[in-house]
Amino acid sequence: MHVLEQNFNTLLELAARQETSPAVHSAKVRPGDAFVALPPSMEGGKGGLDFVPEALSRRARFLVCAPDQTAEIEHMLKIADMPHSPEIIPVPDCRAALGELAAARFASRPEIGLLCGITGTNGKTSCAFLLEHLFTQAGYKVGVIGTVNYRWPGASRPAALTTPGCLELHELIGAMKSAGADTAFMEVSSHALAQNRVAGLHFHGALWTNLSQDHLDFHPDMEDYHHCKARLFYGPAQGGPPPEHKARAVNADDPYGLRLLRACAALPGRTIAYGLEDKKLPVPLLHGEILSLTPQGLHLRQHFQGQSWELRSPLVGRFNAMNLMGAQAMALALGLEARHLPALEGFTGVPGRLERIANNRELHVFVDYAHTPDALEKAIKALRDAGFKRIITVFGCGGNRDRSKRPLMGRTVSGLSDVAVLTSDNPRLEDPQAIIQDVLPGMRGKAETHVQADRRAATVLALSLARSGDALLVAGKGHEDYMIIGADKIHYSDQETLRELLGTRNGEL
């Protein structure tokens, strides 16, 4: 056995020459790999140390671990009677070490010209699509990593997670570079930041959309949720470009964003606030005015440092006005000019984000990913502000997730809709009827209420209630084309179901 205490740089060189590859799942270790023993991702869970024996049986050449784990690993080696002698490399931070190894192995550094992270409870996907459209129209070759898929010119992969694991992230960035992409926009979840899945990536830009209750099954409270997301803005925590080169765009209408702005004002780099409220701030403000909200879309006027311009968009609702503002602020912070921004008028929408389902029955039908109280409020208010006669909302709550938001979602829908249809949405291992019972105490608003646990039947019911001039919102799944019931993941798409029921095929009238 050979114990290497200061030979991590040598391991980086071997990874760069592809003579070894980092691995974090013991079942995926190949002979010659470097197994990185990550700490548990949650309290009481298993960590990489528990899987060292399997990694050894698969002939890992290197074991990267915390310094206080070396003695235990040495003991494992003594009793295992291994046919080879792996090298133990202790490091201060295994997650950071994994990022460095991944960057070396996949040649993801130096990054493509611009790498921008987008974080917030809602709006990440829409802003990623908007920025992709803007920069593509400006002549850049753009890649996107996010909830809908991972894509770049000539390639598209399905997305398992909003922000994939560290190794996959670096592999994706490396693939984008090889394909000639010079810019990437990436949705960055709070889970990814808390678990440092972005280790080894150097962000040139960061966009804050908003913060509202979500993921409190993972975060102990809203403060922890806020601090995890704010890490993206506070300079190169894992190294990277000097902080004076970092661009930031922050929603000044969001209370948590306002707190973040005050902190960012003291940091080097370029920070731009954005919002629909005109206020005195310590950084430049991109101020927007909504000139009109109609079922056909938005008309905005923007003001920034003495310049003004107008924008017409087919997107519906106030929250989409904020998404348009956020994308413009981030683009300005990253170096685009106001003359580039009218290109957003040609952007028609995001899959599953207030996506309009065309039909010849003169019904206004929308599918949206909203699955939090705040997102539901924004989606329903967007339709209300657009001038529809009545709002009919189909929604449910996911199983094995934060139970505290269930009555809040019920209160939001029943308080803002005219008709509420409560149904299932990925019940997972929970009883759908038990989830519904958690929601119902919050449903004491004005809405006419219906309960139908079968999602397709609930959609049929909602369509039967819709009249000309109404808006029907089917919320919760958005772009997803599956339902998780028990341990099974079955095919189910709100869009496909609606098109079938409305008599369209492949979205065509």
Image: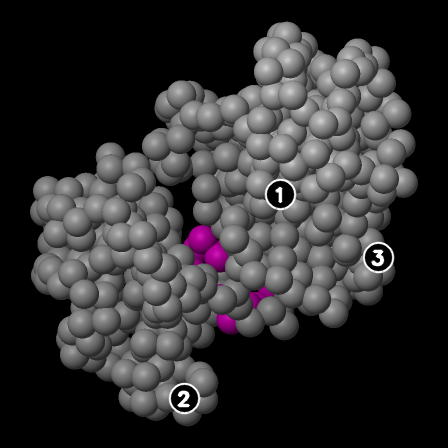
Q: Earlier in the sequence, mark 2 or mark 1?
A: 1
Q: Could you tell whether 324 is left or right of 234 in the image?
A: left
| Residue picked out by circle 2 | 505
Q: Secondary structure at mark 1?
A: helix
Looking at the rendering, the stretch of residues picked out in magenta corresponds to 311-321
Whole-number angstrom distance, CA of label 2 to CA of label 1: 42 Å
Measuring 40% from the left and 57% from the top, which residue is drawn there? Answer: 369
Quarter-of-image position of residue 370: bottom left
Residue 423 lies within the magenta run: no
- Residue kind at label 1, given as amino acid type: Lys
Is residue 280 shown above or below 462?
above
Is residue 342 shown above or below 220?
below
Measuring 29% from the left and 71% from the top, which residue is drawn there? Answer: 471
**x, y percentage for residue 67?**
67, 10
Q: Earlier in the sequence, mark 1 or mark 3?
A: 1
Q: Secondary structure at mark 3?
A: helix
Q: Could you tell whether 276 is left or right of 205 in the image?
A: left
How many marks are shown on the rendered structure?
3
| Residue picked out by circle 3 | 178
Whole-number angstrom distance, CA of label 3 to CA of label 2: 38 Å
Of residues 94 and 388, the one drawn nearer to the viewer in this rendering? 94
